[in-house]
Image (cartoon, rainbow, N blue to C red):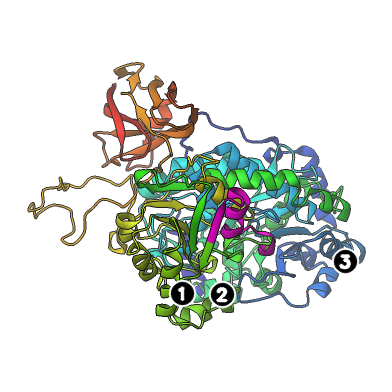
Amino acid sequence: MNKISRAALLLTLGLTFTAPLHAQQQQPAPTPQVMQDDPKMKAFIDNLMQKMTLEEKIGQLNLVSVGFDVTGPVVSQNVNENISKGNVGGVFNTYTPIAARKLQELALKQTRLKIPLIFGYDVIHGHRTIFPIPLGLAASWDVQAVERSARIAAEEASADGLHWVYSPMVDIARDPRWGRVAEGAGEDAYLGSRMAEAMVRGYQGTDLTKENAVMACLKHFALYGAAEAGRDYNTTDMSKVRMYNEYLPPYKAAVDAGVGSVMSSFNDVNGIPATANRWLLTDLLRQQWGFKGFVATDYTAINELVAHGMGNEKEVAALSLKAGADMDMVGELFLKHLGEDLKNGLVKQADIDLACRRVLEGKYRLGLFKDPYHGVSEKRAKKVIMNKEFIADARDIARKSMVLLKNDNQTLPLKKSGTIALVGPLAQSQRDMIGNWSGAGDWKQAVSLEQGIKNVAGSAVKIVYAKGANIADDQQMLDRLNHHGGDLELDKRSSEEMIKEAVQVAQQADVIVAAVGESQGMTGEAASRADIGLPGQQLALLKALKATGKPLVLVLMNGRPLTLTWEDENASAILETWFAGTQAGNAIADVLFGNYNPSGKITMTFPRSVGQIPLYYNHKSTGRPYGGVQLDKYKSRYLDEVNEPLYPFGFGLSYTKFEYGKPELSAATLGMNQPLEVKVTVRNTGNYDGEEVAQLYIRDMVGSLSRPVKELKGFQKVMLKKGESKTLTFRLSPDALKFYNNDLNFVAEPGDFQVMVGGNSRDVQMASFKLQ
């Protein structure tokens, strides 16, 4: 069997997935008008394509990299020449009005048909004004704040010459070793779906032709977050039932929200790489879900099909085009081989025409044929980018993202008086504040923790500082990070000397604030870690600081859940701040000193040890569940570790306390199509005003398939003054009780259900009902 026929046979293996996927949401969002069929657009594109040569059509499928950022091992060559020849459809990694206009003018002045270029960029958590990493944004559980961050990013990116942003990343991830967990919303499909919708709305607005709108790009399609061993680019293999119930809903939610484009993922999906997977890109995405936009590959993903064993360059170019990939990012295999593939019968003219049409339609929806510059000007950029309103929003959104993990004896908030020992390798850092995938953000404009404390606490607080430890001491690690923009400087003193100095500084203070965690380069793409504890000698530093007897406050900066068992047992307080963006230092200080009462909740489970991974709240029960009896041997448990996480999904403390009443249900028995109303009273019993994220979970007690022990189905963020109580109402639609059964039918099955409401997935109040 020759390679192309073998590869074609592999593609057919995915064609058994025929059930439609319905987004799990209480009120399905209507598809925005921008993604509906448009007769005027069809007539325009028909007319344009009748004029195009084969070479010009293939040129539209070529996406090249030019400019300031290199996100992979290859940079496009001869770009100006190819643009002038009409061999380029889009450009990424180029921004600023001057640079974008220069390349656009090449296309408009030197090509025969004057088809405008589309400009894309990795705008992941802000463009110039940087917000918390997406894992931090999700921890706010504030859909409006997340949408606002994307809206600001769209305003800035569009003013800076861009039309297209490679966000949101909606991959469900349950393995914190994978560095790209920083870019997503965590482990839950329901929450991930709500965040995906918010990001798409924020980027695209209601009209893509407006000068302040950008086209979103859903990624990575699909299942990239399930890469084996938490190792980037690795294999993904899962059952159809798990795929439909636990991983696909956020992608579907983004499609339903009208996302304009999709990016294929690097990984294979049950043996077939996503970029060559026709079931994934055509049968599921387009035919079942009704997606009308275009698909771009990830960086050189078509070329990498050769290493996947799918064929030679000519064959994999044909495979990916026929699978449903429309734009070839950087690899230029479409440009090199599709003409010859057509002659040899590996592709049809209709395949090329269809991909070209989709790319042109994307440009039409953006209004680029009417205004190729999309309203870009230096005057507008100067007015929009990093204006005062955006900076203020960045500070507020960063505060919302922070999670208080521990606070013994009301150590926090700190007093705005006395002496603080500020210790740790991240205390003065500006570069790390904006995190990985910070795109066009300028770290020199970021506020460090030290500066933030000075700004918020004022002159009545004395700060004494010591670095205490390097972020990492392993030379190989440092070389890897610095080779790719890590900007890490190694203190030449020994660890013993640095720790000794830190202890001496701590002894002068009333309280220690230790800024510890990861370098920004330790998370993101190609940044998997096998050991997810604090790197380097930071734990040794903390142990020495603990021995001083001073209150020890940890300020964590990191892009993933960490293993923090010693830290949790010994620190007085722990504040998770992620990488909080341009205003990080001010926002952290606002929380530390009580200007803002923390309200964030984690969206990924924090394991106690790496050996527990994957660890997630909505797991299945086993036939031998462990009940906590130490000598009960033949149960699902470890000999050397407990089953429970360090911090469960949805967990986060406040400076005040909240109490939940027992849920009250609108009915004890429901009909199959009857909605359920759940009321619960939440009371603020502490001494501070504060916000609480009330979370609603269900459990299907008996099913044709084993069902998760909990599933998030709703949440509300509510502000309560001290002593105040409110009764919240959750409405569960019939779809909230449905799941994909073994035949991939989306069904609700009669039987017993539990409803649970609480401040996290562990600490809940429960009620029961029956579905008939």
| Left or right placement of residue 117 versus residue 631 in this view | right
Q: What residue is pinned by disc 3? A: 106
Q: CA distance from mark 3 to mark 1?
A: 46 Å
| Left or right placement of residue 742 versus residue 591 in this view | left
What residue is drawn where x is 42% and y is 66%? 235
Q: What residue is pinned by disc 2? A: 488
Callout 2, which amino acid? Leu
489, above or below 466, in the image: below
Q: Is residue 455 magenta?
A: yes
531, above or below 623, in the image: below
* Mark 3 vs 1, N-terminal side: 3
| Left or right placement of residue 624 versus residue 520 in this view | left
Callout 3, which amino acid? Leu
Q: Nearer the viewer, mark 3 or mark 1?
A: 1
Mark number, residue 472: 1
User: Which range of residues does the magenta coloring cover?
Assistant: 443-463
Asked if marks 2 and 1 touch (Cβ < 8 Å), the reply is yes
Helix, strand or loop at mark 2: loop
Q: Which sits in the foreground, 481 or 304?
A: 481
